[in-house]
Image (cartoon, rainbow, N blue to C red):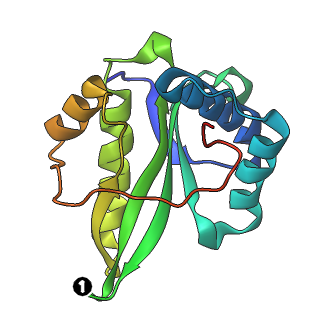
């Protein structure tokens, strides 16, 4: 892990970085070009309605605040499990800038989020979904202790992102 990296909660000042990273995720993993206006509103909604989720930022620390540089992110949303009487924290919008991959950035993000989740008495575990063909990401998640579940994710998605 890089010595000068910090993990912190995102603020509205991070909106443009998060939008840029989310756009890159969609293009890299699914070949989708997102509508920037819709994406910007979607990210802004997380800041306007914190009950929906929370972004975390991995950042290279500079000598001054303006010298800091976001290099990775993850969004945490929650899902209630009546079977467990607790919330699963879902990791979404996971992204590490190309120039900083394989340097421990996601491991640091994951460790920080996992620690917060374990400290939350209402949290019963972490989950995420990953593209079937994204073997590199799957390997990274398994290396951190995540396991494939017996569940398949099915959807009835009528958003504009669904290919015709």
Q: Which residue is drawn at 75% across and 59% down?
A: 45
Foreground pick, 161 / 115: 161
State which quarter of the image contains the C terminus.
Answer: top right
Task: Give the image location of residue 16, x and y in percent.
Answer: 76, 34
Q: In which quarter of the image is residue 101?
A: top left
Report how many numbered discs are placed on residues in the image: 1
Residue 48, compared with residue 40, is above or below; it is: below
Task: Give the image location of residue 44, x and y in percent.
Answer: 77, 52
Residue 60 visible at all: no
Q: Which residue is drawn at 34% across and 65% down?
A: 117
Task: Give the image location of residue 54, x and y in percent.
Answer: 57, 58
Q: In the picture provided, is 61 more to the left or to the right than 15?
A: left
Q: In the picture provided, is 1 more to the left or to the right than 23?
A: left
Foreground pick, 102 / 85: 85
Local SS, label 1: loop
Q: Which residue lies furthest to the front in this view?
A: 164
Residue indicated by mark 1: 84
Task: Give the image location of residue 14, x and y in percent.
Answer: 70, 39
Residue 80, compared with residue 24, is above or below; it is: below
Q: In which quarter of the image is residue 64?
A: top right
Residue 25 visible at all: yes
Q: Residue at x 68, y 28 (%)?
A: 20
Residue 86, compared with residue 74, is above or below; it is: below
Residue 101, compared with residue 159, is above or below; it is: above
Q: In the picture provided, is 130 more to the left or to the right than 34?
A: left
Q: How crowded is mark 1: few (under 14 residues within 10 Å), some or many (20 or more)?
A: few
């Amino acid at each position: 892990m890089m010595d000068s990296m910090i993990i912190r909660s995102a603020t509205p000042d991070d909106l443009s970085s998060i939008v840029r990273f989310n756009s890159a995720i969609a293009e890299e993993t699914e070949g989708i070009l997102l509508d920037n206006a819709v994406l910007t509103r979607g990210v802004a909604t997380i800041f306007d309605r914190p009950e929906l989720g929370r972004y975390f930022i991995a950042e290279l620390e500079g000598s001054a605040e303006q010298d800091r540089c976001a290099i990775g992110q993850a969004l945490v949303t929650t899902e209630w499990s009546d079977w467990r009487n607790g919330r699963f924290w879902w990791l979404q919008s996971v992204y590490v800038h190309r120039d900083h991959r394989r340097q421990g950035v996601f491991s640091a993000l994951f460790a920080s989020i996992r620690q917060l989740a374990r400290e939350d008495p209402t949290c019963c575990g972490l989950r995420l979904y990953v593209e079937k063909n994204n073997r590199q990401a799957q390997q990274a998640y398994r290396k951190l202790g995540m396991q494939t579940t017996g569940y398949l994710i099915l959807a009835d998605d009528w958003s504009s992102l669904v290919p015709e």
